[in-house]
Image (cartoon, rainbow, N blue to C red):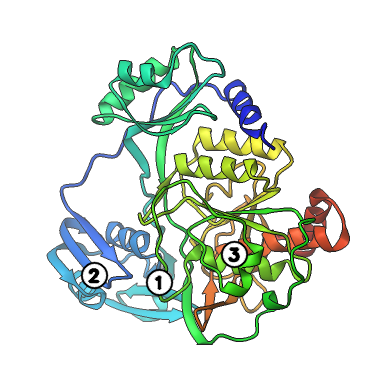
Amino acid sequence: MRNVLRFFLGLVCLALPLVASASPAHPSETNGLSWSVKQNQVDADIQKWDLPRLLSKITSATGWQVYVEPGTTLNISAKFKNVTQDEALQRLLGKLNYFTEETNGVTRLKVWRTVRTAATQMVKAEKKDHRIPNELLVQLKPHSTNSIDQLAKKLGATIIGRDDKLGFYRLQFADGSTADAAMQALASDPSVGAAGSNYYVDPPSPVQMAQVGQATANAALNLNPPDGKGQIVGLIDTAVYPPDTLQKYMLTPINVTGQPDPQTDQPTHGTSMFETVLNAMSADPSMIQPVVIYGSQDATTDYELVEGMVKAVDSGAKLLSISSGGSDNSPLVASAIAQIVQLGIPIIAAAGNTPGTEPTYPGAYPGVLAVTASGPDGQKAIYADGGSFVDLMFPGTELVNYDGGLFQVVGTSTATATAAGTIIGTANQNNISLPQAIANVRQKYPFR
């Protein structure tokens, strides 16, 4: 596995053409809406928005399911700061009828003019522009005569991320126009194998994570000791802090961010996914290799995502589980995934917690097994994506132990971790290859 980086580098440079131009960033708005569900705090500076625009912003910011009565109109102008969500809704929608309710961890906002049952039209979330306008990712060709330092100096860029083994770099420019000009120059540079924009990747966030009781007997606690014969699972996520009894199943975490993600009074997302993978492997567990691509920041980028995947593979992981999800299709990430899949390493990724059929990446990249979540009735959960790119469906609810408490975790990330653990467990228990295990799991847990 020590040769993975060199093999990966060569294939990426051969397979991926240069992107000649970058998509322009959306112009910044002079007014806007800032909505924090966790802090229950809303700021608004809105001038003459129509109702569809407002509701699209709300569902994008909150993750709520928003329904409106067809034909309902409203012109909204408002300015306030540091108000609660309830007060914000009153100020923004007070001229209409509205109601919020929560079921199975999913919040719905219904807005109507005549009767509540008329609020039947689902509002699509506003697509976020995750492109970082003043950054580029660059992949140098093997044995390039130019160094990245020379290239950055020529372009007027600062290197803020580098992997010399991989020849993969993150460049920052003074502004978006300078980055766009640099992209044009990179297209004709013979030392460059690939280049493209860098994108933010939102942190994985469960639909619900809540303490539901005290710690109880957990299936993972009854697992056989790891024997080193199973196939290592690469968990690409946030920091992992498992209970002491489960430490023996975890390899030393790899952190590509260099930023700590401190423990809190509830499990980190990575911690809950670690235990979920372990539970799903049943009686014959493999070791889990955590790779932290999220630190103390609210988001990571495509640079850390690629770094995390490669680090996991280079450390010996034979299957990758990724809960991250976004709407941006990056040629650089797609190429990296293609090369990892060509190595025979399956990638399992979440379909996303936004209902609908829009593609969620990395789940929607070719070669990735995308997993959606089922609800208590065995059907697709109301919060889950059900696009054509989805391959598997697993239960979206898991109970995990943490610091004396029992927590219920709900979302497509839970389903993804369960799928990853089930595939590895099937291979271990039946002494079969991962492709055979995946074929068995496809038959048992198909989405369609």
404 over 187 or under it: above or below:
below
Mark-to-mark CA distance, 1 and 2: 21 Å
Residue 285, image x, y percentages: 74, 64
On the image, numbered disc 1 is attached to which residue?
264
Residue 299, image x, y percentages: 39, 52
289 over 185 or under it: above or below:
below
249 over 438 or under it: above or below:
below
Image quarter hosting the N terminus? top right
x 38%, y 28%: residue: 22
On the image, numbered disc 2 is attached to which residue?
41
- Residue 161 in the figure: left or right of residue 176: right
Label 2 crowd bin: few (<14), some (14–19), many (20+), radius 10 Å? some
- Residue 344 in the figure: left or right of residue 350: right
Mark-to-mark CA distance, 2 and 3: 31 Å
Q: Amino acid at mark 3?
A: Phe
Q: Secondary structure at mark 2?
A: strand
Q: Amino acid at mark 2?
A: Gln
Q: Is residue 380 visible?
A: no
Q: Amino acid at mark 1?
A: Thr
x 37%, y 21%: residue: 149
On the image, numbered disc 3 is attached to which residue?
274
Is residue 429 or residue 206 the one in the foreground?
429
- Residue 21 in the figure: left or right of residue 362: left
